[in-house]
Amino acid sequence: MTTPRTAETREILDLLSARGKALEELYCRADSVRQQHMGDEIFLRGIIEFSNLCSNDCLYCGIRVSNRDVRRYTMAADEIVAHARELPARGQTTVVLQAGESPVFGDDELGEVIRRIKRETTLAVTVSVGNRPLPVYRYWRECGMDRYLLRFETSDPELFRRLHPDCSLDERVECLRHLRALGVQVGSGFMIGLPGETVETLAANILLCRNLDLDMIGIGPYIPHPGTPLGDAPNVYRDDPEMFFRAIAVLRLFNPDAHIPATTAFDAVFPGSGRDLALQRGANVFMPNTTPVEFRRDYQLYPGKPCVDEDASQCATCVLHRIEALGRKPGAGPGHSRKSAGKTPQ
Ligand code: SF4
């Protein structure tokens, strides 16, 4: 028996089917809501992908544990802190510490890296290293962690189970609730066009973001990686890639106060323009890659990832030009959540 559609689901499905003039109106509305609620600043969050070790085997991911073709690396703590120190001079006010889900880089060691970055720089610190127990999140929070990113990827529990042999959707949502209870600014999101999803799943994904009351929402097109079991499974919207932008526009309408990044995957599908278009259709955050160039090719969750040959300073210059060309300006402050401003310990 199928569940009856709610009025909100019907509204989202209607918006996701927009074409022609209706599509132009959708993009205009999303851009206007972004401007009214988030302003014209584009916040820059520099990502350091500090390790590609992962114990998990997510079916779509290029650095899953079963992919033996990946050269594994983990940056030293001093190296991570040294790279973080360079961000403020490039207009980047947040560092995002990202890695696979692996205990190899110890929880205490990561806590010490967070502490040092908070002590030695003005940066807000976002961490993104997967599902962890509550005491670990609490410890990192005590070390000064401001935010955490953990995407749920799909709101369909059965599809989630098929794609993620190592955890359930309930466990991941529980992690998000733990983080919220600790006063951490919480980011999540999903992939668009996973094999096995329907447009109803996409609508449910957008509603789950709203219902979780997220501070930050990252979404991006699913891109098949040849070194994974889904290598031959194309994106559901391969013949209608405009759906990726419809999704970000509708996401903005239903989450007016959330920070929404123009994720790198948009540039992989629309080289050179994807992130700019996302920023004109609801997004307000850009996350330049700050990973040392010698590691970039080894952190490919999907193929065709842009900016793998540029270094951090080239990426920083490029992003500032892109922002200027859009008539916008880089965010001046840390770009904390509009929802939980003031709750973050300084
Ligand atoms: S998606 Fe994340 S948790 Fe899953 S295999 Fe890739 S790095 Fe590991």
Image (cartoon, rainbow, N blue to C red):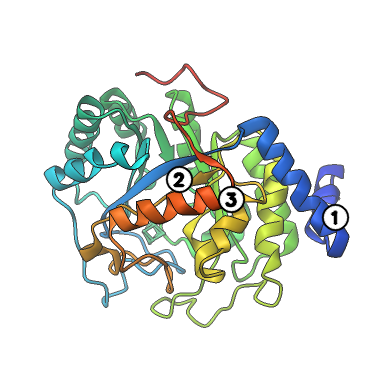
Crowd band around label 2 with a 10 angstrom C-alpha radius: few (<14), some (14–19), many (20+): many
In front of the other: 179 or 216: 216
Is residue 169 among what the camera can see?
no
The residue located at (55%, 70%) in the rendering is 269
Q: Measure the alpha-carbon separation of dots 2 and 1.
A: 28 Å
Residue type, numbered disc 2: Leu
Q: Measure the alpha-carbon separation of dots 1 and 3.
A: 29 Å
Q: Which residue is mark 1?
A: 14
Quarter of the image where ligand 1 sits: bottom left
Crowd band around label 3 with a 10 angstrom C-alpha radius: few (<14), some (14–19), many (20+): few
**Residue 245: quarter of image:** bottom right
Residue type, numbered disc 1: Asp
In front of the other: 48 or 326: 326
Q: Percent position (x, y) of residue 199? A: 74, 62
Q: Percent position (x, y) of residue 33? A: 72, 38
The answer to whether mark 2 and mark 1 are in CB contact below 8 A is no
Tell me the SS state at disc 1. helix
Q: Which residue is mark 2?
A: 150
Tell me the SS state at disc 3. loop
**Which image quarter is the C terminus in?**
top left
Q: Measure the alpha-carbon separation of dots 3 and 2.
A: 29 Å
Q: Residue 104 — which label?
A: none
The residue located at (50%, 68%) in the rendering is 268
**Residue 247: quarter of image:** bottom right
Q: Which residue is mark 3?
A: 326
The residue located at (21%, 71%) in the rendering is 71
Residue type, numbered disc 3: Leu
Q: Percent position (x, y) of residue 220? A: 55, 58
